[in-house]
Image: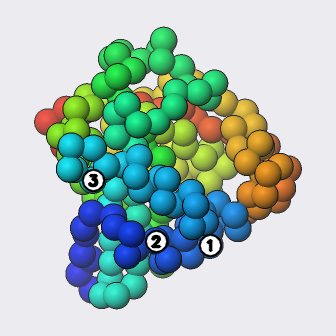
Amino acid sequence: MAEINYRPFTPEDFAQVIVLGNSVHGDGYLDQTNIKDWYEKGLKNNINAGFVAYDNDKLVGFRITYAVGQWDIDKWSTPTKWRVSPDEVCYFKCNTVDANYRGFGIGSELLKLSINAAHMQGASAGVSHLWKQSPGNSAVKYFTKCGGELVQSHPDKWREDALNGYDCVLCGHDCHCEAAEMIIYFTSDNK
């Protein structure tokens, strides 16, 4: 494998991010409207918390992270169980790595870069909803290895999205996948 190049996520990456995101997560996961919104939620204080990974000109991974104060804490989040104030928590929206590039630390490096940027934006922790039905529950295992702690499980997290056009790779348009709400508290070890 060639050397992987990491850099902040930009609008020039949108087309490749949409293709990779939909191929991994299912058709309708990303489109021109939501990718622009997700990108803008990651910008704060002239710092971008989203990152991409390239092998030459090929996008092989991306991490979308929303800055503190730029995401809605909804019914799928449990801030009463977080050990920090909600106004200090960023949201790790999406981490995606091409299947042919998994197992080489790309996802972990993207997360580390996002943690560092989110910390500079004012975050002291980051929460995410991990797909428990990922092959071998790899999403939860990866996030736990990176310091994530389980907050709560949420059945049917993506069902409403599926009923509105998202085509889950496992369930189709009637998704019943479960999300593990997890949080990482930023330390000198994970920044």
Ranked by sequence position, the earlier of labels 2 and 1 is 2
Mark 1 belongs to which amino acid?
Answer: Ser
Tell me the element at label 3.
strand
Mark 2 belongs to which amino acid?
Answer: Phe
Q: Which mark is residue 48?
A: 3
* Drawn side of residue 60 relative to residue 135, left or right: left
- Residue density around tag 3, few if under 14, some if 14–19, many if 20 or more, within 10 Å: many
Q: Which of marks 2 and 1 is in front?
A: 2
Tell me the element at label 1.
helix
Question: Which residue: 36% across, 49% down?
Answer: 42
Ranked by sequence position, the earlier of labels 1 and 3 is 1
Can you say which quadrant of the picture contains the C terminus?
Answer: top left
Residue 174 in the image: above or below residue 185:
below
Question: Which residue: 35% across, 22% down?
Answer: 87
Instruction: Please state the horizontal and vertical placement of residue 14, each as a whole percent of the image.
Output: 46, 71
Quarter of the view holding residue 19? bottom right
In the rendered image, the residue lying farthest to the top is 80
Residue 122 in the image: above or below residue 35:
above
Q: What residue did someone put label 2 on? A: 14
Is residue 182 visible in this depiction of the protein?
yes
Do callouts 2 and 1 mark residues in contact (Cβ within 8 Å)? Answer: no
Ranked by sequence position, the earlier of labels 3 and 2 is 2
Is 64 in front, or is 136?
Answer: 64
Is residue 90 visible in this depiction of the protein?
no
Question: Which residue: 70% across, 67% down?
Answer: 27
Can you say which quadrant of the picture contains the N terminus?
Answer: bottom left
